[in-house]
Image: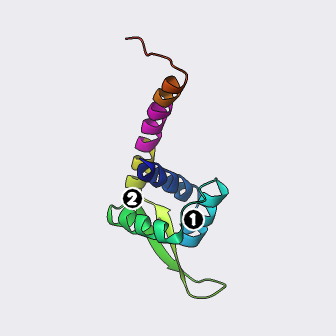
Amino acid sequence: MLKGILDGCILAIIKNKEVYGYELTEKLESYGFHSFSEGTIYPLLMRMQKEELVTSTLKKSTAGPRRKYYSLTKKGEEELNKFKLQWDHLQTNVNRVLSNEVEEN
């Protein structure tokens, strides 16, 4: 379950601004995701690139070798919108369970 949530969060961060992998890890950490390393993030980015959700561009860095910056594709934006709908539904249902509310049909 967390995998899908992490994917959605990554897409949301990339939508706001193109980022490189380490920067993405730092942004996730700033939102409270402390248990993810670059070793977790890079395979997700590679998979997302294969699925054409993100694209990458190599750019010069002021400190060291060139960096691979990721940006969202149209397909990635569609996937992010789908994630947001699923997240809203999941959050509503989990909150119902936690507050012991039963949905009336």
Mark seen at residue 53: 2
State the image coordinates of residue 32 (x, y, percent, origin top left): 64, 53
Q: Looking at numbered disc 2 in the image, what kind of residue is underneath it?
A: Leu
Numbered circles on residues, count: 2
Q: In terms of image quadrants, where is residue 83?
A: top left
Q: Is residue 41 above or below residue 95?
A: below
Q: Nearer the viewer, mark 1 or mark 2?
A: 1
Question: In the rendered view, does 98 fall on the left or right side of 46?
Answer: right
Q: Main secondary structure of the magenta part?
A: helix
Residue pushed farthest left?
A: 51
Mark 1 lies on residue: 24
Q: In terms of image quadrants, where is residue 47?
A: bottom left
Q: Which residues are magenta?
A: 82-91
Mark seen at residue 8: none
- Residue lying at 48% horizontally and 55% vertically, measured from the top left: 11
| Disc 2 packing (10 Å; few <14; some 14–19; many ≥20) | many
Q: How is the image coloured?
A: rainbow
- Residue lying at 45% horizontally and 34% vertically, measured from the top left: 90
Secondary structure state at the residue bearing disc 2: loop
